[in-house]
Image (spheres, rainbow, N blue to C red):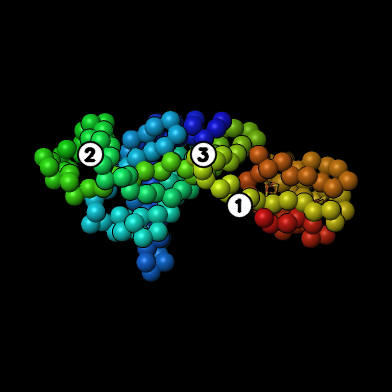
Amino acid sequence: MDAKTCLKKLEYVGVLAFATVDREGAPQIRNISAIHYEPDALYFFTARGKGFCRELLSDGRVQILGYTKFKEMIRLSAKAVPVPEEEQKKWMDMIFTEQPYLANVYPRDTREIGIVFEIKAGNMEYFNLGVNPIFRENYTFGKAVTAREKGYRIAENCIGCGTCAERCPQRCIEPGTTYRIQPEHCLHCGACFENCPAGAVIKL
Ligand code: SF4
Ligand code: SF4
């Protein structure tokens, strides 16, 4: 798996959830399908009057979520920016050609109320609940800074009692002088953290 494959999977999902934060700090989420995909970028259309557009212009941070029928969750965290003025028409026409329903929503030249944003860099989380053990991995594409690590880690004060391994629903903790979590199979459920008698499990 890699970022390009994740983008392709998002394209197959088609309708994605886009989350932003409004000026009161409240979460806002909506479905978007007016999207054009390149192998390492995506372009999407919205109308300038929408709160979504205002949130993107004032902050730009967005989380995009897709879920496949194979129980794969793909989350993209990125900054969206308007494409340069001279390229707006090109990308808008491409999105309208690929998504014919848009001509019904914005007939004739009413599409001019729209604006196209681009995402050329971001952090991608892939989380597959359809395999055993579950599988997760993070990827970065473009010039995005690597995302903060999430989940749990076992520190050197581990006393090797094995309680965490017994409580782990995914059996993804290896024994050793210091036990070790396999991050690619971890649910981030916190059972190891809650049950460690030595306080050796660290939440990242
Ligand atoms: S967080 Fe949950 S899944 Fe991950 S290692 Fe701990 S118990 Fe296992
Ligand atoms: S429960 Fe805590 S002390 Fe025991 S093996 Fe796991 S991390 Fe180490």
- Please rate how many residues cluster around mark 2, counting C-alpha atoms within 10 Å: few if below 14, some from 14 to 19, many from 20: some
Q: Position of residue 179 (x, y in %)?
A: 81, 46
The first of marks 2 and 3 along the sequence is: 2
For this view, does 177 lie left or right of residue 152? right
- Toward the front, the furthest residue is 86
Of tags 2 and 3, which is closer to the observer?
A: 2
**Can you identify the residue that label 1 sits on?**
148
Answer above or below: position of 123 versus 25. Answer: above
Query: Which mark is on residue 141?
Result: 3
Answer above or below: position of 70 versus 186. Answer: above
- What's the amino acid at mark 1? Arg
Q: Position of residue 193 (x, y in %)?
A: 72, 56
Measure the C-alpha gap from mark 1 to mark 2. Answer: 36 Å
Measure the C-alpha gap from mark 2 to mark 3. Answer: 26 Å
The image quadrant of residue 9 is top left
**Can you identify the residue that label 2 sits on?**
89
- Please rate how many residues cluster around mark 3, counting C-alpha atoms within 10 Å: few if below 14, some from 14 to 19, many from 20: some
Q: Looking at the image, which is closer to me, 192 or 23?
A: 23
Q: Position of residue 47 (x, y in %)?
A: 24, 50
The image quadrant of residue 35 is top left
The first of marks 1 and 2 along the sequence is: 2
The residue sitting at 31% across, 45% down in the picture is 84
Q: Would residue 124 be seen by someone viewing this image from the given angle?
A: no
Q: Secondary structure at mark 2?
A: helix
